[in-house]
Image (cartoon, rainbow, N blue to C red):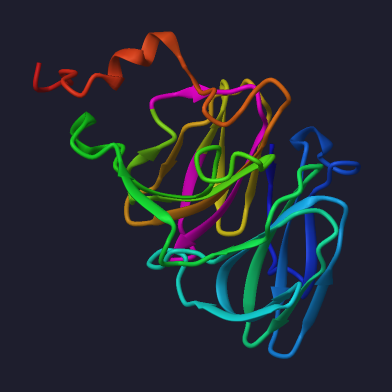
Amino acid sequence: MIVKQTQPFEYGYNSISEINGKNSSMLMDFGIIRFKDGMVYENEADKERTFLLIQGKVTLKWEDKEEVIERNSCFDENPWCLHVPRDVKVTIEGLSEAEVAYQAVYNDNAFVSKLYTNKELRSEQFGAGTLGETATRTVRTVIDDSIAPYSNLVIGEVINHPGKWSSYPPHHHPQPEIYYYRFTPEMGFGYSEHGDEVFKVRHNDTALIEGGNTHSQTAAPGYAMYYLWLIPHLKDARFNDRIFVDEHKWLLDKDAVIWPNK
């Protein structure tokens, strides 16, 4: 399913999925908080939460801490992301036009709140040197099992290079997944696979991917495609439980011979 966003987000919180409400099969709360200069947003919930700065400048306040963070481009700069356990109050003040992505899941684990800075996040090139560079992409992992094993969520970003593929070769996993898209230039577009269905996606659209569906992506030539990816853990399925489609596993061989070079 694709949630189309044909108009700019409203100022404040824009809900896209809710654990106990709309699109509940995603098993997490997700939405976009849009700020203008001077606007204040407060959040306190009985859930584990992340607040990831997509673009703009804001002040974050939590517990006895305060930090001013800024991001001019989600394509060219790593994100900042605040990660807090249940019942911690978070206050965000906009210092410019800004967008912050919100994710929440249930988690009874007690852990120390952490602000992941744009300098410490893991940014990697996936797919380089294989498949004729047709699936080269930039992957930024913010939280996964190896980073925060006490967490019940996964969050990261992909920069899908123009004309190339990502989340490839085709794979699936038991957990649902959410992709939130941005393009540069903004009139760009791409395509999102959900099992045997394929959807056209544009700037600010969101893909709600049911567990068990393959979900490869591609961006139109000339347009870079950013997407935020979010996954909730299941009791018996963690992030690394990715299952590659059998008929396409041969593509994982770094020496795979691809036409026309056969």
**Which stretch did the figure color magenta?**
169-191
Does the magenta segment cover residue 246? no
Please give left or right for residue 152 compared with residue 186 in the image.
right
Left/right of residue 31 with respect to residue 138 in the rendered view:
right
* Residue 149 sits in quarter: top right
- Nearest the eye: 88 or 6: 88
Q: Is 170 one of the magenta-colored residues?
A: yes
Give the quadrant of residue 15: bottom right
Q: Position of residue 183 (x, y in %)?
A: 47, 60
Q: Looking at this view, name the residue that lies furthest to the top.
A: 247
Q: Nearer the viewer, residue 207 or 139?
A: 139
* Residue at image coords 46%, 57%: 188
Residue 206 against residue 36 in the figure, above or below = above
Image quadrant in which the C terminus is located = top left
- Percent position of residue 230, x then y: 62, 44
Q: Position of residue 76 (x, y in %)?
A: 37, 67
Q: Residue furthest left?
A: 261
**120 left or right of 7?**
left
Image quadrant occupied by the N terminus: top right
The residue sitting at 70% across, 51% down in the picture is 111
Q: Is residue 96 above or below residue 63?
A: below
